[in-house]
Image (tube, grey):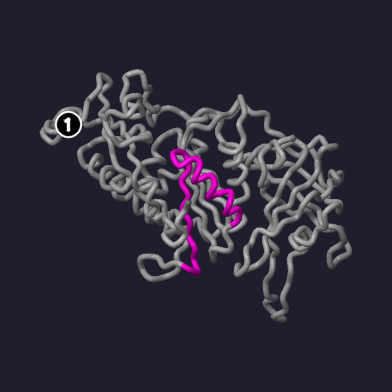
Amino acid sequence: MYNLTAAGSAANTQAGSRVFLYEVVGLGQSQNTDNMSYPIRSSGSTLIKVPYNRMNQEMQRITRLGGKIVSIKHLNGSGPGTPAASQATSQTQPPMPTATEKPKKSKANIPVNIYRPKNPYIGKCLSNEELVAEGGSGTVRHLKFDIADSSLRYLEGQSIGIIPPGTDDQGKPHKLRLYSIASTRHGDDVDDKTVSLCVRQLEYKHPETGETVYGVCSTHLCNLEVGADVAITGPVGKEMLLPDDEDSTIIMMATGTGIAPFRAYLWRMFFEQHEDYKFKGLAWLFFGIPYTANILYKQELEELQSKFPDNFRLTYAISREEKNPDGGKMYIQDRIKEHADQLWQLIQNPKTHTYICGLKGMEGGINEGMSAAASKFDVDWNDYQKQLKKEKRWHLEVY
């Protein structure tokens, strides 16, 4: 189970006992490596076993020796005679693709705008549940809608529009608001008959009057009763779709309700089991929230970490309860800086995709952390990030 007080996967005793196998190219045999006991394969790659708590140091050492990590595999046991270690070091185990290879492109038929604002689908609210525990701030609801009689279909990472009832100050019908879908394409009931959202009630002070103002659509949804109608449009969005490759590394960075698309990803990867998709890669979620009580889908996330420790990492940043190394509040960008060296190594692999969803302010801090890591290797992060975007491996949805 995740240790909330530590709020970092390195502090997790289960994680700390893991051993990983690095496949490294570029070391060869030299004055610096002649005395290394690691096997150098006919392909020219070197296999190095590394404890979890030494991953950062070993990555830096390999780089100093002129090496490049082309794959990182988890070993189920730490001894050299374990079945997992033997299998991972076998010549039959193919290496990860090199950085020159292009990521696999999605061949999915992406549904877009099946229902438009002038002719929305009228669904029914099946459930409306509070996600913020006692002592947390604000209200966030998980809503499930019935779409059994519709033509609506969607993919993980897409959004749907909701049109609130009534008119605005000018007497015109309210415009739709977009919300990231929080369920997989098969819905929470895995029957292709529902779609779910994660909605926080917008609340702010009017800049002139000081009056508390509530968001029109978010308030409508948060107060929606079971059985009530809901006007749905969409789906829309192609930026946040998952890659088809089941061996991908998926890095997710979320604040607040930005967790919505990542919940859909994780359900598809781990909770659902389908013949056409069996995730075998690594998923790492960074989740920024103000209080422990605001950890949305907390039970689901920690159940995943408990059941799939080899494939899922969970790192919280709880701003009102934890301090960063400088004594300030612990934000998600501080966690990114903390793990920047590991993230930098993962991001270089062409099978790694990074997704950012949440408050717009988080983007600058994430770039700052990654820039610090990249600079250690004389790489300009801004240029490298442009290349990642060009390769469609850096996905951003902020608001």
* Residue 155 horizontal/vertical position (percent): 67, 37
**Coordinates of residue 373 in the picture (x, y in percent):** 34, 50
The type of residue carrying mark 1 is: Ser
Determine whether 201 is above or below 102 in the image. Answer: below
The image quadrant of residue 274 is: top right
Location of residue 285 in the rendering, given as x and y in whole percent from the top left corner:
50, 48
**Where, by quadrant of the figure, is residue 65 drawn?**
top left
Taking the magenta stretch, the answer to whether it contains residue 221 is: no
Residue at position x 82%, y 54% in the image: 226
Q: Which sits in the foreground, 220 or 270?
A: 270
- Give the class, few, some or many, for how many residues have Cα within 10 Å of label 1's Cα (few <14, many ≥20): few
Q: Which residues are magenta?
A: 296-321
Between 368 and 308, the one nearer to me in the picture: 308
Magenta run includes residue 303? yes
Q: Which residue is depicted at the point 48% across and 50% down?
A: 314
The residue where tag 1 is placed is 37
